[in-house]
Image: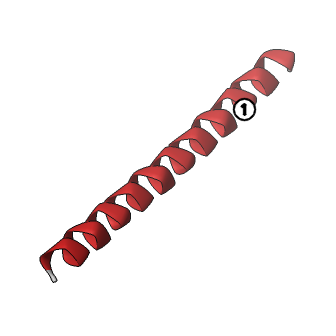
Amino acid sequence: MQYMSGIVDVAIGLVFVYLLLSLICSSLTEMADRKDSFVNE
């Protein structure tokens, strides 16, 4: 049972890291879009 607990912990960690990275990437994309629109005006 300890083995299954480790797998669950790793899965939760991977999901958390994936969500964190996607949030960071979308934030960077949003900032880049804003900078581009600010420069164009």
* In the image, farthest residue toward the left: 40
Say how the picture is coloured.
secondary structure
At a point 68% along the width and 39% down the height, the residue shown is 12
Residue 28 in percent (x, y) is at: 38, 56
Judging from the image, what secondary structure is the residue with disc 1 in? Answer: helix
Q: Compare residues 34 and 23 and report the one nearer the observer.
A: 34
Q: Compare residues 39 and 6 and report the one nearer the observer.
A: 39
Residue 27 in percent (x, y) is at: 44, 60
Image: 5 above or below 14: above
- The reply, left or right, for residue 31 in relation to residue 39 is right
- The reply, left or right, for residue 12 in relation to residue 6 is left
Image: 16 above or below 36: above
Quarter of the picture containing the N terminus is: top right
- Crowding at dot 1, Cα within 10 Å, few <14 / some 14-19 / many 20+, comes out as few
Which residue in the protein does label 1 denote? 8
What type is the residue that disc 1 sits on? Val
How many numbered marks appear?
1
At a point 58% along the width and 39% down the height, the residue shown is 17
Image: 38 above or below 31: below
- The reply, left or right, for residue 5 in relation to residue 11 is right
* In the image, farthest residue toward the top: 3
Q: Compare residues 26 and 32 and report the one nearer the observer.
A: 32
* In the image, farthest residue toward the right: 2
Quarter of the picture containing the C terminus is: bottom left
At a point 40% along the width and 59% down the height, the residue shown is 26
In terms of image quadrants, where is residue 34?
Answer: bottom left
In terms of image quadrants, where is residue 31?
Answer: bottom left
At a point 21% along the width and 76% down the height, the residue shown is 37
Q: Compare residues 11 and 33 and report the one nearer the observer.
A: 33
* In the image, farthest residue toward the bottom: 41
